[in-house]
Image (cartoon, grey):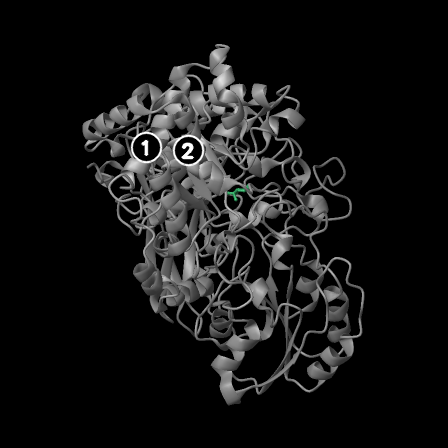
Amino acid sequence: MMKKFNKSLLCLSIGVSITLAGCGSVNNKVMPEPVNSAVVSQIIWHDNKAEMDQFINELMAKMTLQEKIGQLNLLTSGWDKTGPTMSDDYQEQIKLGKVGSIFNAFTADYTRGLQKLAVEETRLGIPLLFGYDVIHGHRTIFPISLGEAASWDMQAIQDGSRVAATEAAAEGIHWTFAPMVDISRDPRWGRMSEGSGEDVFLGTAIARARVKGFQGDDLAATDTVLACAKHYAAYGAAQAGRDYHTTNMSTRELWDTYLPPFEAAVQEGVATFMTSFNELNGVPASGSEYLLDDILKQRWGFEGFVVTDYTSINEMVPHGYAKDLKHAAQLAINAGVDMDMQGSAYSDNLQQLLNEGKVSQAKIDQAVRRILEMKYRLGLFDDPYRYSDNDRQKAEIYKQDHLDAARDMARKSFVLLKNDNKVLPLSDKKSIALIGPLADSKQDMIGSWSAAGERWKRPVTVLEGLKARFGDKLKINYAKGAGYEFDHTDTTGFKDAIAAAKKSDVVVLAMGEKWNMTGEAASRVDLGFPGTQLALMKELKKLGKPMVLVLMSGRAMNLSWADDNVDAILDVWYPGTEGGHAVADVLYGDYNPSGKLPVTFPRSVGQVPIYYNMKNTGRPYDPQGAEQKYRSRYLDSPNSPLYPFGYGLSYTHFDFSEVSLSNSKLDPQGSIKASVVVTNSGDTDGEEVVQLYVQDLVGSVTRPVKELKGFKKIHLRRGESKEVIFTLTPQDLAFHRIDMSYGAEAGDFNLYIGNSSDTTNKVSFSLSADVDLLAANPAD
Ligand code: NOJ
């Protein structure tokens, strides 16, 4: 039987090289664009295709229409609730052959039991596919995805997904609904926490890493799972940051910013795609022939299957796009949706739609085939129970290696936003007051989408982590002090908190958002501290003690007061099962923070959406300029963010040399090298993320003020210097031009290398002639 992916055909371009060509959104092979289509076929799946085709042809020849429609139906089990509806009779439906896949079910025993119903009680015994939201860990929970993104460490991210897949696959799961690759620039949107942040280049690299981690290089191995690129497409651009809301954007923005991570996932061999809930330019994603058929299946040559999000076929009715559920089912299958998640739109309507000639047999057959192929690739026709293995489950979940990897990933994800007077690390302190609703709260440590992570039991809290690390060397005076619920107004806890602070050398505040204030259906209009947290911080400030904020959140928050008033801020996101230990590692100084923001932190919600690679406008504001009024600015706030994308401090200090270029002229077939020497001039070893940005000064359409085009995380011992070299080719300068063709335009560019998107360390170069990428290389 066909089993293997041949990964040699893939573009392996992230994390391992500082060469820009071939990496991320500027992949030099092909960038399909709306004018001249170009195909990125998933030939990676073609080993033993003939054998698989024969097997599926024979199977499909035996299937009735009802059995085929059953394969297109995905229902939730009662084990977990991740949407508004439940299916009480899913076991009955399995026995009737009316469901081909189940989600929200895990453990070897439970999945084995359900699989038995499909295999033994249906006519053809076609095995079920089990899906689950294994987003940032399965049992061992890693930091939330946005936190992982802050590590800028592609290998660690890939390894994290590998661990998640290994644990999930041991508990009967074949398929994860991850990675979420939506670019998001609006922190009001709670789902910012589930992705990689605001940037297309970073997001694309992370999409690749996660697909590789989940799927490995052999889908039939029992420690890999099918990945799912979601939510396709442009879900992260919901108007006003309100979840499920309308998305409107130009085709160019869609292609240059929102689609590249999805395309990269296809190139990486992702097995499935999930449609998004939103409408895009008037058409709900689950009914969009443009997105599903034209772009995904035709232009990109995606050969896996497309599943909807939860009841999103049904939602085309309230969207005002379908007149009833039958009409919605017709629109969805004809647009290219293969599997219906929890909506029963296909199971209730496809037969009639076929009879009426509104849907063709060929459409239904194509969808069935795509799904059966994945079951085949997983080896389920050889052994339907191969993932439901009690011994493997026992051996794999919470394995020490996994816990260690989660702790390490957590440390890497923390971003030090402020550290005045070197208040951190705390190793020389005798006593601390640990204060806040997040200081000793297991449930909060693992954030939203925590899969099977046993929220109430397993996670290590900050208090537990500090006690374990500091032992008797540190007196910890703990008080919860404040509440973080939106409606919490009770201040009686302040007294204990103030008393704890008074008897301590330093105040450590564990504050931020409750875990379920981010994730799905968790939009906010206020990015401040909910409940009485800020009020308590203000009271504590009056004591004049050094204050450290350990921030937990799944979005960019408004930290303006904290930035003005506390001495140090460490953003730890939701750090996962081992989070408390990781926080202690960093607070104590065992680990030197190295994370960098994957999203811009605004000064106020009024600046949102705010992101680093904005356009300049015709009246850019210059605070030093003579003209102040008729400029693009706010009267009551600077334009600049509180903390820019790519920003993050260290316990040591890094100096950057000026940028040197191998040549200031880049030819169409050539490349140039840009380099800096980075020196660790502080007094501890540390890691730095060296970032390269480009600005195209004049274009046939206006270009952003800066675009990330490369990064490299380096380790430098104290006193050590290293040269970091990037190679730049015309492909790295490509975009969708005025006629929507993809290529680079001759002209002048600025190139920056630094340790944050606000770097001013600049040189200039020029590209000598236009480069038409698709014309030059149309079907590579
Ligand atoms: C809805 C969410 O939008 C999606 O991300 C998730 O995978 C599904 N529910 C299944 O739980």
As drawn, the label of residue 598 is none
Judging depth in this view, the residue of 4 and 739 nearest the camera is 4
Residue 694 image point, x, y percent: 45, 40
Residue 720 image point, x, y percent: 34, 67
In the rendered view, does 183 fall on the left or right side of 173? right
Residue 674 image point, x, y percent: 35, 46
Quarter of the image that includes the C terminus: top left
In the rendered view, does 299 fall on the left or right side of 429? left
As drawn, the label of residue 97 is 2
Q: Residue at x 67, y 58 (%)?
A: 559
Please tell me which of labels 2 and 1 falls first in the chain: 2
In the rendered view, does 90 fall on the left or right side of 185? left
How many residues crowd around disc 2 within 10 Å: few (fewer than 14), some, or many (20 or more)? many
Looking at the image, residue 283 lies above or below residue 312: above
Count of numbered circles on the image = 2
Residue type at mark 1 is: Leu
- Reading the image, the residue beneath label 1 is 124
User: Is there a contact, CB below 8 Å, between mark 2 and mark 1?
Assistant: yes
Looking at the image, residue 571 lies above or below residue 92: below
Looking at the image, residue 433 lies above or below residue 162: below
Q: Residue at x 74, y 80 (%)?
A: 496
Residue 611 image point, x, y percent: 58, 43
**Gap between marks 2 and 1 measured at Cα:** 9 Å
